Image: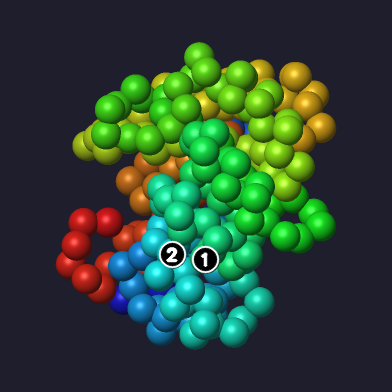
Amino acid sequence: MNIKENYEAIMARVSAACERAGRSPEDVTVMAVTKYVSAERVEKAIAAGVKHFGESRDGGLLEKKQAIKAPVHWHFVGRMQSRKVKEVIHECDVIHSLDRASLAKEINKRYQRETPIDCMVQVNVSGEETKAGVAPDQLENFVRALESYEHIRVAGLMTMAPHTKNPEDVRPYFRQLRELCDDIKRLQLPHAPCQHLSMGMSNDFEQAVEEGATIIRLGTSLVGNETGREA
């Protein structure tokens, strides 16, 4: 697998999607999701120009951070267990899966730095029972309640769209998340600037970019899968 070629092809597709939507490619961050690849592949991705990496397991994050010395940005993109917060809270730059009050309480308790940690509130826009996330009609109340946690900054929203054969089928979910983000922005809450939309994966990132994604999470299409497990 040639990660450099993958990255260049993805960036070309991102640029084309931005052009169709009247956006700048500079407004879109490509994150490599590295759950199913080795630190060696992360190094190759860094050499190709990737600067943002996402891990969905605490063990994977800690192992790769120990192995990778380059100054890159680490994101935690999986469901975070409250009991694991203390192990990873100071090892990542952004948490993409804030979805419940108990987790917010633990993050706020364990975080020790002066500036708040950026968190994305995960929203279950599809309503699937198998997916985590705040229900859209509960989002405003949830975000307002986070004001009492001084160590949390709501940097944006995240969603996981249904996996479909036709990526156009998930466009309405991306559009809904963008509209929800706009609603939060209009509240002008100091703790919730809500500037980012983390949405879009390998099979649907072009539709996500066209609908306003600022962070796309790419695994197989960018760094591949060394385990043979479903990414």
Q: Residue furthest left?
A: 228
Answer with left or right where residue 156 lies relative to residue 203.
right
Q: Amino acid at mark 2?
A: Asp
Residue drawn at the location 67% of the way across and 56% of the way down: 111
Q: Residue at x 65, y 50 (%)?
A: 109
x, y percent for residue 45: 48, 74
Indicate left or right for 220 with 216 as reference.
left
Give SS at disc 1. Answer: helix
Measuring from the top left, give residue 13's x and y in whole percent. 47, 51
Residue 70 marker: none
Q: Residue at x 62, y 72 (%)?
A: 72
Q: In this orientation, which residue lies closer to the viewer: 86 or 189?
A: 86
Q: Is residue 172 visible?
A: yes
Which circle's residue, 1 or 2, is located before the other in the chain?
Answer: 2
Q: How far apart in space, not on screen, are marks 1 and 2 (Cα)? A: 7 Å
Q: Residue 135: percent from the left, percent from the top?
A: 45, 22
Helix, strand or loop at label 2? It is helix
Q: Quadrant of residue 93?
A: bottom right
Quarter in which the N terminus is drawn: bottom left
Foreground residue among 224 and 143? 143
Name the quarter where the C terminus is drawn. bottom left
Tell me the residue that label 1 is attached to. 87
- The structure residue drawn at horizontal position 66% and vertical position 19%, both measured from the top left corner, is 183
Q: Nearer the viewer, residue 26 or 214?
A: 214
Kindly identify which residue carries mark 2: 58
Residue 11 visible in the displayed image: no
Mark 1 Cα-neighbour bin, 10 Å: few <14, some 14–19, many ≥20: few
Q: Kindly check if marks 1 and 2 are in contact, taking CB atoms under 8 A apart as contact.
A: yes
Q: Amino acid at mark 1?
A: Glu
Residue neighbourhood size for the residue with mark 2, other residues' Cα within 10 Å, grouped as few (<14), some (14–19), many (≥20): some
Q: Is residue 80 above or below residue 173?
A: below
